Image: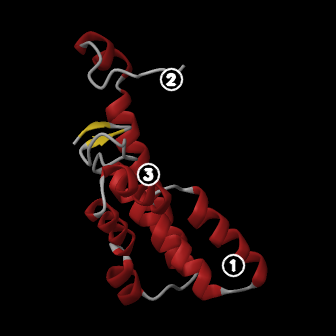
Amino acid sequence: MQQTVPMNPPQSQARLSMPGLLLRLEGVVMFVGILALYSRVSGDWLAFVLLLLAPDVAMLGYKINDRVGAAIYNIAHFYGLPLALGLIALFAGWTTGLALALIWLAHISMDRALGFGLKYETAFQDTHLGRV
């Protein structure tokens, strides 16, 4: 049996625990930390700017339908994949792979800071952070 989480909890509950604010703040903190790491690995800032929005190409899955679109978008916006790439690159001494992983992580963190979360199959606007 699937448990559903209310998209709009009671205002008193949301104000007390501030999940939306904390999740966005978490995204900001991650983004700033990733920028610092990218700077330390001497990443190319032009590449950073040019590739920062690349994971959003995954939105093209919505041209097929909401279910496929959500699946592809969520795969591209799941922290695990760029973290795995970054670890592999780190241990292999592959600086380009590490830079790409950090750019990818920065994108995901930026999205979270802006309130864009992982998608539900119902519609592009329905995310784990609430309705966009």
Q: Which residue is mark 1?
A: 89
Residue at figure coordinates x 66%, y 65% from the top left: 84
In the image: residue 57, left or right of residue 80: left
Q: Which residue is mark 3?
A: 29
Q: Nearer the viewer, residue 37 or 126?
A: 126
Question: What amino acid type should be assigned to the residue bearing mark 1?
Answer: Ala
Residue at figure coordinates x 35%, y 57% from the top left: 69
Residue at figure coordinates x 37%, y 43% from the top left: 25
Label 1, residues with CA under 10 Å away: few <14, some 14-19, many ≥20: some
x and y, in percent, of residue 9 in the image? 30, 17
x and y, in percent, of residue 126 in the image? 28, 40
In the image: residue 114, left or right of residue 68: left
Q: Dot 3 lies on which element? A: helix
Determine the CA span between mark 2 and mark 3.
32 Å
Residue at figure coordinates x 36%, y 43% from the top left: 121
Q: Dot 2 lies on which element? A: loop
Quarter of the image for the N terminus: give it.
Answer: top right
Label 3, residues with CA under 10 Å away: few <14, some 14-19, many ≥20: some
Quarter of the image for the C terminus: give it.
Answer: top left
The residue mark sitting in front, 2 or 3, is 2
Determine the CA span between mark 3 and mark 1.
23 Å
Q: Nearer the viewer, residue 94 or 132?
A: 132
Residue 2 bears which disc, if any?
A: 2
Determine the CA span between mark 1 and mark 2.
37 Å
With respect to residue 123, does 54 lie above or below?
below
Question: What amino acid type should be assigned to the residue bearing mark 3?
Answer: Val
Label whose residue precedes the other's in the sequence (1 or 2)? 2
The residue mark sitting in front, 1 or 2, is 2
